Structure formats: structure tokens, C-alpha cells
Amino acid sequence: MQQPQAKPDRSLGELFGDLTKDTATLVRQEVQLATAEMTQKAGAVGKDVGFLAIGGAVAYAGLLAIIAAIIILLATIGLPWWLAALLVGLVVAGIGYFLIQQGLTALRRTNLAPRQTMQTLKEDAEWIKEQKQ
């Protein structure tokens, strides 16, 4: 940020007034930056969650057909229907648990912190300290 040159004939009140005005402008700009950054990150996460939901619904329909076919296959080779359904259900539940854990791990890795805003806030705090000296 460009520092205004202080004129020797300006009063201390004028200098503090300018500092207050510049600080208020800086805070407004930081809020705008944080809002823009968080909106961008939320949009990206929302799109990814939408793809997960749609893909999950389509895959679910196909999975139900495959599960039914496996149960029928196991029953036709000699297993009782209830045992075939139980075995297939346990395998499907295990796979589902694994996939849920993978999705949660991926979401935890998503960094939603407004890094750019945090960095500029640090720089602004340093600038304000310099102005007060």
C-alpha cells in the first residue's frame, strides 16, 4: 500500500484522522476480499458435493441390480436365500463403510480457510504499527 507523504504543516489531529480513514478503508477491503475468497471456496465444494450426490444416486440403482443378481446366483448354487442375502449384505456394508471413510477424509483435506485474507491482514497490522510510530 502506498504511504502518503506527510506535510510538515499538518496537525497531529489531521494525521490521526487520515490514519483512521485509511484504516477503515483497509478493513472494508479486507472484508470484501474475505467474502470473495469464501464464496469461491464454497462454490467449489458445493459443486463437488453435487457431483457426489448425483453419482451416488445413479450408482445406487446399478448396485441394487447387481446385489439382487449376486443373491440369486448364490441361492441357485445351493445356499439358502437368507444366507445368500446376509453374506451379500455384509460385503456391501463393508464396501460402503470404506467409501464413506474415503469421502470424509477427502472433505477434511479441503482447506476452507481464507489464506489470502489472513496473510493480508497480517501485512495490514504491520502497516498500521508502522504508521503509529
Image (cartoon, rainbow, N blue to C red):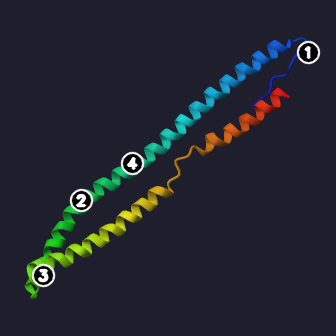
Q: Which labelled disc corresponds to residue 58?
A: 2
Local secondary structure at mark 3 = helix
**Toward the viewer: 84 or 26?**
84
In the displayed structure, 14 sits above or below 48; it is above
User: In this figure, which residue is indicated by the disc labeled 1?
Assistant: 8
In the image: residue 73, left or right of residue 14: left
At x 82%, y 32%, the residue is 130
User: In this figure, which residue is indicated by the disc labeled 3?
Assistant: 73
Local secondary structure at mark 4 = helix
**Residue 52 place in picture, x, y as percent:** 34, 56
Q: CA distance from mark 3 to mark 2?
A: 23 Å
**Residue 50 place in picture, x, y as percent:** 34, 50
| Crowding at mark 4 (Cα within 10 Å: few <14, some 14-19, many 20+) | few
Q: Which labelled disc corresponds to residue 47?
A: 4
In the displayed structure, 116 sits above or below 111; it is above
Q: Which labelled disc corresponds to residue 105?
A: none
